[in-house]
Amino acid sequence: MGHSRASKAVTHARLVETAASRFKERGVDGISLADLMKDLKLTHGGFYRHFESRDALVKEALDLALEQSSLSMKGWLGEGGKPNVAHFIDSYLAEAHRDDRADGCAVAALAGDASRKSAEMQAQFREHIEGSLEPLTAALEAQSVDEPRESAIRMMAMLYGALIMSRAVGDSALSREALKSARKGALKLATGTKKGGRRPRSRGHG
């Protein structure tokens, strides 16, 4: 690869990486091309050396953001070299993750955008979520949890929702309560129902 082509590839990657972070921070429509290029100290006109349109950048940036989220999830879930659902839950619902929108979960950051945008964008999110459910389902199955896929879906819905809610109300007692309550519920899903067994009977109700 010649110097000019290598330089173009580096700039292209910087554009995609920066867009992925800015979209998670501000939403897909929260930053203009002019501002994005200004952040990178590039000319607005130079954008079209890399992409035919803003939509092309959005697609590529979302692919990267979702891929980064998948890698984070797999890293948390595989902590210690074997499935660790509790570590995944704790990491996802940490206040540090809540506060790090630019490097955090793309689904929680951009689910609202996806629901209002094109079927193509929704397909990107669907593919990512399906891919995320697979290792979580396998981890729950390894822990002998009944209906592991259903439990995985319920858990991810709980985690996504808690992170969205905790961010919506700002750094507050309610934000921390949302994270704490979701953690409790998610851990219960991971351990409460075992194959061939029954849920523990609640105490104090006869």
Image (cartoon, rainbow, N blue to C red):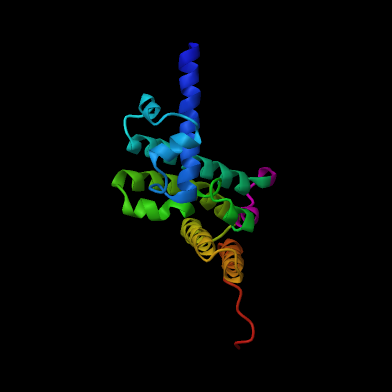
| Identity of the residue drawn at 47% across and 52% down | 109
- 131 shown above or below 147: above
**Residue that protrudes farthest toward the left in the picture:** 119
Quadrant of the frame with the C terminus? bottom right
Which of 5/107 is in front? 5
- 66 shown above or below 116: above
Residue 200 locus on image (x, y percent): 61, 74
| Identity of the residue drawn at 47% across and 41% down | 20
| Identity of the residue drawn at 36% across and 29% down | 51
Residue 190 locus on image (x, y percent): 58, 61
Q: Would you say 144 lies left or right of 32 here?
A: right
Reply yes or no: does residue 202 show up in magenta.
Answer: no
Q: Would you say 135 lies left or right of 122 here?
A: right
- The answer to whether any part of residue 138 appears in the image is yes
Residue 142 locus on image (x, y percent): 59, 52
Q: Main structural element of the magenta stretch: helix, strand or loop?
A: helix
Location of residue 94 (image quadrant): bottom right
- Tell how many labels: 0
Residue 164 locus on image (x, y percent): 49, 60
Q: Would you say 16 lies left or right of 114 here?
A: right
**Residue that protrudes farthest toward the right in the picture:** 80
| Identity of the residue drawn at 38% across and 52% down | 113
Reply yes or no: does residue 84 show up in magenta.
Answer: yes
Bounds of the magenta segment: 80-90
- 192 shown above or below 31: below
Which of 119/202 is in front? 119
- 137 shown above or below 191: above
Which of 94/171 is in front? 171
**Residue that protrudes farthest toward the top in the picture:** 2
- The answer to whether any part of residue 92 appears in the image is no
